[in-house]
């Protein structure tokens, strides 16, 4: 809620102060001073309307004790003269009778006294959203959506659970929205719908709230739908699975008809269980998409689903498009075989098996944040283009090429910058290996020198005899006492790049042996 102008009218100074204080705490609210009577309130609205609809406040709060015109009459007059303003009735008696009277007069909500921050915030947000919707329809720069039954309806059903039905449905809706088409995403998996979970949505209204409404108008739809940050309008499955039984085939038909009149694209997630409601979606859809995976169990389930649709005269197999999810080239079951088994038309666009690309966004419940470089996203968006939800040039997400090249360039620069450090680490590791090997050579040379010294031979020559050319004796010494001869050999640790640096490390080896010349026969 940003930039919501709020005008209030109450004759009670204490209530006016409390109301102004709470309104100031609401994020994005811009409350004006509270007006003491209905005459002043209507005059202020009339002067603002003379300038234009954009000068009117989005929300007006009317206290039920306002005078001289009664509160319900004030609400009725505001609704008639200023339809782009959402009105909230403030009352100490929020009974069903008061609520009904306020709704009949044209109010968008009722808030109780004493004031509650949460309740008032919810009422103001709903009224502001309604006012913004009305202004979009009334504004000549933003014409209303065409109220014609020309919207394209796509029903997405799964052969069985776990084949990725909801992921495909959500990405199809996002692709259509990105193509500039007004899009609605409907969750008709009435007992186990996951659209809200995948899109990180907390909601109160659902399709079940429309079940008993015979005339589903634009206003009724707007109250029940959730405007998602990614663009599509969401009509969600009820949070309580048992309420799914309230959505009959007749109710579903009315809702889908109303949606097609007001949105260019309507994507319906039908889940995997056939009820009267989602059977209507499959029957009336322009495109019925059956999602399956290339494995025996899923393909058999797809065949059963298609045969059931045919037996119940919901849809013929040749009128069903099968989409293959988690496709791999090495799979024994390829799309052409699935088409022969199920008797359906197979989509040429397949979705590759790349769950690691999805894992982070699925764990976060934000499928809308899936990276444009994801092969899964590219596969579903290509499928959207194939079934006519987007144009051919919009099969791949926008800006993918530019962003991809930029990120590749960044990776290249980072790699080049890390190369010297990597080489330095490798040199140090190799130098450490040379130092360790020098310890071994020093010990071996000392042993040979001690044996040579014990029999009166040249000990230094014996120590140097088996040394590789890169190692040289830096220190050498012999000692003799108590019939023993001891030798100390110091070897200089060689450098990986001779002449570049001097590695000041000498490794010493020690050994001793019995002096055989000192032993008397």
Image (spheres, grey):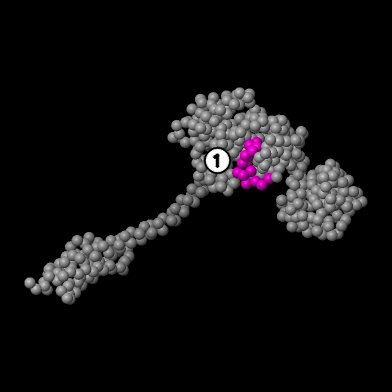
**Residue at (83, 43) in percent of width and height:** 100
Residue occupying the point 19% across, 61% down: 466
Q: Nearer the viewer, residue 119 or 287?
A: 119
Q: Position of residue 235 (x, y in %)?
A: 68, 39
In the figure, 70 relative to 192: above or below? below
What is the count of numbered marks?
A: 1
**Residue 30 can be seen, yes or no:** no
Q: Position of residue 291 (x, y in %)?
A: 56, 33
**Foreground of the two, 416 or 435:** 435
Q: Is residue 208 left or right of residue 310?
A: right
User: Left or right: where does residue 113 sit relative to residue 298?
Assistant: right
> Where residue 176 sits: x, y (%)?
62, 37
The furthest residue to the bottom = 481
Q: Is residue 192 magenta?
A: yes
Tell me where the magenta segment starts and ends, as one range: 188-203
Residue 408 magenta-drawn?
no
Q: Which of the image's four quarters has the C terminus?
A: bottom left
The answer to whether residue 131 is visible is yes
Relative image position of residue 82 (x, y in whole percent): 83, 44
Q: Which residue is mark 1?
A: 377
Residue 152 drawn above or below residue 135: above
Which residue is at the far left?
521
Q: Quadrant of residue 20?
A: bottom right
Residue 420: image quadrant is bottom left
- Vertical placement of 373 versus 510: above or below? above
Q: Helix, strand, or loop for circle 1?
A: helix
At 59% from the left and 38% from the top, the residue drawn is 166
In the current view of this chain or complex, which residue is farthest to the front?
Answer: 242
- Seen from the viewer's position, the closer of residues 418 and 157 is 157
Residue 248 occupies which quadrant of the picture? top right
Report the side of 257 relative to 382 (left or right).
Answer: right
């Amino acid at each position: 809620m940003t930039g919501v102008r709020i005008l209030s009218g109450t004759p009670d100074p204490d209530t006016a102060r409390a109301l102004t204080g709470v309104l100031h705490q609401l994020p994005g609210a811009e409350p004006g001073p509270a007006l003491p009577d209905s005459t002043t309130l209507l005059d202020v609205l009339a002067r603002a309307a003379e300038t234009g609809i954009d000068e009117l406040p989005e929300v007006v709060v009317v206290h039920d004790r306002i005078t001289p015109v009664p509160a319900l009459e004030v609400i009725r007059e505001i609704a008639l003269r200023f339809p782009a303003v959402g009105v909230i009735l403030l009352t100490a008696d929020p009974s069903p009778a008061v609520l009904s009277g306020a709704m009949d007069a044209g109010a968008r909500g009722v808030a109780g006294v004493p004031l509650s921050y949460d309740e008032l915030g919810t009422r103001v947000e709903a009224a502001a959203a309604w006012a913004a919707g009305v202004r979009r329809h009334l504004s000549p720069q933003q014409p209303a959506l065409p109220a014609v039954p020309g919207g394209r309806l796509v029903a997405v059903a799964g052969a069985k659970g776990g084949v990725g039905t909801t992921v495909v449905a959500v990405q199809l809706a996002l692709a259509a929205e990105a193509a500039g088409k007004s899009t609605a995403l409907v969750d008709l998996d009435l007992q186990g719908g996951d659209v809200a979970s995948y899109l990180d949505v907390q909601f109160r209204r659902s399709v079940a709230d429309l079940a008993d409404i015979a005339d589903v108008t634009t206003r009724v739809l707007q109250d029940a739908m959730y405007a998602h940050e990614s663009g599509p309008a969401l009509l969600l499955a009820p949070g309580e699975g048992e309420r799914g039984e309230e959505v009959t085939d007749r109710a579903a038909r009315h809702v889908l008809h109303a949606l097609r009149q007001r949105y260019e694209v309507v994507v319906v997630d039908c889940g995997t269980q056939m009820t009267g409601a989602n059977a209507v979606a499959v029957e009336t859809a322009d495109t019925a998409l059956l999602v399956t995976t290339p494995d025996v169990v899923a393909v058999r389930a797809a065949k059963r689903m298609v045969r059931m649709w045919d037996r119940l005269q919901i849809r013929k197999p040749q009128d069903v498009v099968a989409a293959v999810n988690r496709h791999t080239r090495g799979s024994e079951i390829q799309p052409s075989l699935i088409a022969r088994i199920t008797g359906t038309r197979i989509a040429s666009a397949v979705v590759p098996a790349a769950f690691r690309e999805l894992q982070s966004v699925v764990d976060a419940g934000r499928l809308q944040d899936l990276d444009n470089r994801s092969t899964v996203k590219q596969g579903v968006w290509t499928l959207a283009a194939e079934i006519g939800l987007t144009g051919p040039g919009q099969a791949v997400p926008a800006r993918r090429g530019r962003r991809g090249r930029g990120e590749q360039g960044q990776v290249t620069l980072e790699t080049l910058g890390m190369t010297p450090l990597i080489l330095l680490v490798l040199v140090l590791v190799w130098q450490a290996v040379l130092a360790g090997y020098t310890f071994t050579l020093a010990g071996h040379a000392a042993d040979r020198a001690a044996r040579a010294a014990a029999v009166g031979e040249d000990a230094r020559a014996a120590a140097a005899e088996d040394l590789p050319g890169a190692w040289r004796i830096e220190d050498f010494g012999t000692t003799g006492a108590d019939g023993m001869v001891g030798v100390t050999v110091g070897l200089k640790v060689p450098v990986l790049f001779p002449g570049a640096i001097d590695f000041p490390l000498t490794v010493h080896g020690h050994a001793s042996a019995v002096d055989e010349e000192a032993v008397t026969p």
